[in-house]
Image: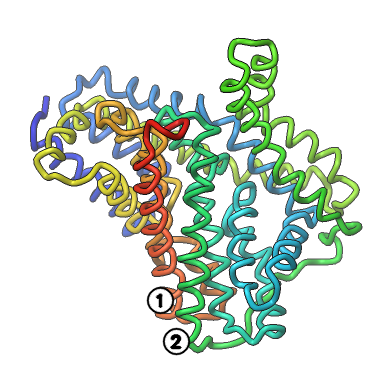
Amino acid sequence: MVTGNMLLVVFLIALIVLFVLILKMKLEPYLALIGVALGTGVVIGIPLSEVPGIVASGFGNTLTGVGILIGLGVIFGQFLAASGAVERIAQSVLKVFGIKRSPAGLALTGTAVSIPVFFDAAFVILSGLIKSLTKKTGIPVISFVTALGVGLIVSHSMIAPTPGPLIVAENTNSDLGFFILYGIICAIPATLVGGYLYGMFIGKRIQPNGEIEEAQVSEAEKPRKQISTSLSLGMLALPIVLILLNTFSKLLFPDTQLAAFFGFIGDKNVALFISVIVGVIVLTPYISTPKQTLYSEAISSAGIIILITGAGGSFGAVINQSGVGDHLIATMQSWSIPVFLLAFIFSQILRASLGSATVALVTTSSILGPLAIDLGVAPVLLGLAICAGAIGLSLPNDSGFWVVNKFGKLTIAQTLKAWTVGGFVAGLSALGMVYILSLFSGILPGL
């Protein structure tokens, strides 16, 4: 079996092959990840009879933690969007911030909305606000595009129960409630620095090509009637509140029936299931689209996410079985690279190369997550450093790049300057917050 530095060589070759299969040969990431997982197991020298079992168990173990939740999360986001709740949330946040600081409000709106709604859909849904805000304020459109895009991708990469961060929390064995809490603490400054401040900076230096494009919604798809702001915010907060109740009940009422009750309804799967059922009942009066259509679209979207997630777990399982983790610990000590920075770099490289924050989060956390205790760091902080690395450097191999490019009416060069660099600035800001939180390890709960 391969040992020592050759493990790193095999690992790097496996990553290169993965990049080539996805980027050059345009192979579906699910197939590429499974193929590379099998091939890596064989090359490393794991007995042939054991390789398929390791790949299958890695797939299954990953989906045990997040499979149900991914499906529920996509359905939940679909109903929020169809009811008009997403737009109502955006309008309320902007009202609070006022016209002059509306880019900051839009950035934070994106951070809130992207928790239940996937990036691409949320950007299209909210892009209509950009045109009207530009006309009202005179602020360059690129500032709003950057603010919205960065705000969306920050929470998409950092705040559970969004699938990527949820998987990181699972793989690092972090308490989900604390992961959400500290994820929000890291996400807000990252959004304001990368989305608002950098967006205002770059907006003065780039002239857009044309008017912002608005999402077209047919009469049949428009909400039946206007949903209230309080109901919209309540539905968005429901799953997060339930999960946080679980966390804090354990601290305040340990080993009690009350803690057991909140432990049940605050379990991530149960919390989101309750939220979906409540959403289906409460949001129906505001939805014109047939429910069956919403279910079908959500399940179709969730399917590929579940497959890619499981396949990333398979690849991570093979890498962990090889012993590369133990070797990395020894190697990192000689490199003197801080653990959080290493986690950030790993995740950032995968994010930029594969064009998928979710794949980057799954793969990096599968490899580094089980090593948190050995590395002597808080699992929550290690996980958030991984999440920070998945925020920036979105390139043309990322579907989100083209959503921003199309609806922002930017050239590729302008999209790189605004969206790609803005995300990178936000990622570095989030990493900085992780280091600040690490100063309070052993003082703050969960760290």
Q: Residue at x 70, y 62 (%)?
A: 93
List the residue tagged with mark 1: 417
Rendered location of residue 263, percent (x, y): 63, 20
Image quadrant holding the C terminus, namely top left
* Residue 168 as seen in the image, left or right of residue 83: left
Query: In the image, what residue type sits under mark 1?
Result: Lys
> Residue 205, labelled with which disc?
2
User: What separation in Å lies between label 1 and label 2 (alpha carbons)?
Assistant: 10 Å
Mark found first going from the N terminus, 1 or 2: 2
Dot 2 surroundings within 10 Å: few (below 14), some, or many (20 or more)? few
Determine the secondary structure under disc 2. loop
Rendered location of residue 158, percent (x, y): 48, 47
Q: Residue at x 50, y 62 (%)?
A: 400
The mark closer to the camera, 1 or 2, is: 2
* Residue 162 as seen in the image, left or right of residue 51: right
* Residue 209 as seen in the image, left or right of residue 330: right
Query: In the image, what residue type sits under mark 2?
Result: Arg
Rendered location of residue 44, percent (x, y): 16, 30
* Residue 91 as seen in the image, left or right of residue 73: right
Residue 56 visible somewhere in the drawing: yes
> Residue 134, labelled with which disc?
none
Q: Residue at x 37, y 35 (%)?
A: 441
Q: Residue at x 69, y 74 (%)?
A: 214
Circles 1 and 2, Cβ within 8 Å, touching? The answer is: yes
Relative to residue 446, is residue 47 depicted above or below?
A: above
